[in-house]
Amino acid sequence: MSRGRELLLMGRRAMRELTRVPRPQTVGGNRIELLEGGDALFPQMLQAFAEAEREIWLATYIFHDDPSALALMQALADAARRGVAVHVVVDGFGSKATLARLREQLLPAGVMLEVFRPLERWWAWLQPGQLRRLHQKLCACDDRVGFVGGINLIDDRLDLNHGWGDAPRLDFAVALHGPLVPSVLAAARAVWARAHLASSWREEMRTVARSAQPVRRTLAWMHDLRARTALPTHDEPVRASFVVRDNLRQRRAIERSYVNAIRGATAQVDIAVPYFYPGRTFRRALRQAARRGVQVRLLLQGKIDYRIAALAARAVYDELRGHGVRIYEYTPAFLHAKVARVDGRWATVGSSNIDPLSLLLNLEANVIVDDPGFNRALGERLDVAFAASREVDEPLRGQGWRGWIGRALVAWASALYLRLAGIGGRY
């Protein structure tokens, strides 16, 4: 085998290992706080950045440049200047408009900024995999505190398509302390490494004939990563797990977590999500739960940001309502929450929608909590949101030819999009 071929294979193995996140493992001994909106999340992140001593890892879809986001940028830069190793990775589509500002603010301070699948040249769209985006919202500081949820780094009252509004969008995250934090850190570090290797791989391969050190350094880093992400086990509450959806070994982990919880429900299922177009297995689980007497409530968008997403959700309204699922549309503001609760213990908060993009394409991350107190806290927030929403109660009309054509068009468009992204089979 030639030297170049051998090093290329080494690099590919390193890429697979670096971007692998430990499989979900439920552990106790966590302290988990539910945070509603950036108004609750951002002050805690600022405090964590100010108290960080060794490292900060942050991954996000949108890192904007409004005043709230600029304060976070400044805190990251300040941490880097005092010697903290600060790593930030943003999505090349979600943060495209603010990349210049991010580089201007972060790079001079020593922040190690990477862009996941950048789109700064038109031909980047022709590269394979560009429809698979970084949609995670993760942060970890010193293995001490972590943040996971659906909240982008943008003011709650600012929408990129519709401008500023009076009411904050509905969104959630969690602050984590305890043995689950290393998994969050590992996931943020893995996606940063994935973006870093993709951007530097070509340059490193140009030196392959002269030296194997770049690849060997990567392999050494990979071994260090694996050594630092083993989870300690605890029996104390709060019990929780960290679940990712990637394009490697955990492609269906989040979907399976949802479906298994719904299949085991005995009393109640509440789901709040802005983009809702579940596959056959997910819809079947919801229908069967409602038929056996479980109260199933869905909180979906009433104030629309993307028309096509609303059409996709409404294509399955009649099917689900026909089996007893109750559907509400949230109208006070934009809905961006991705949360759910089942019965009195199981709950999840994260970045994953229930649609093909989140369940089959994007990088996503959720925390699943097995705790009555957390479940109750989330339930109280959801009850307020349901009370402020409009229940969909129009007569069922999906059995007619118009309903059939609408569902067929949405299914066709979804299948076409997935084929373009390289996903085969039926959703």
Image (cartoon, rainbow, N blue to C red):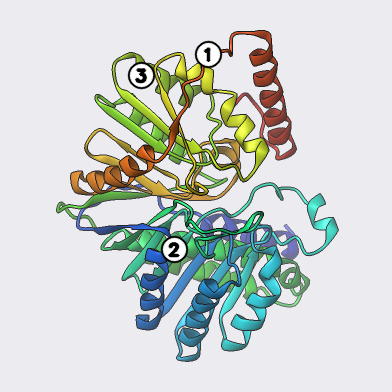
Residue closest to the eye, 267 or 12: 267
Q: Residues within 10 Å of mark 1 (few under 14, many from 20)?
A: few
Q: Image check: 245 left or right of 27?
A: right
User: How many labels were placed on the picture?
Assistant: 3
Residue type pointed to by label 3:
Ala
Q: Which residue is mark 1?
A: 396
Q: Is residue 37 visible?
A: yes
Q: Which residue is mark 3?
A: 290
Residue found at the far bottom of this picture = 82
Quadrant of res 299: top left
Mark 3 → mark 2, Cα distance in angstroms:
34 Å
Residue 313: horizontal and vertical position, in percent? 57, 30
| Position of the N terminus by quadrant | bottom right
Nearer the camera: disc 2 or disc 1: 1
Quadrant of res 409: top right
Q: Residue at x 54, y 65 (%)?
A: 154
Q: Which residue is mark 2?
A: 38
Q: Secondary structure at mark 1?
A: loop
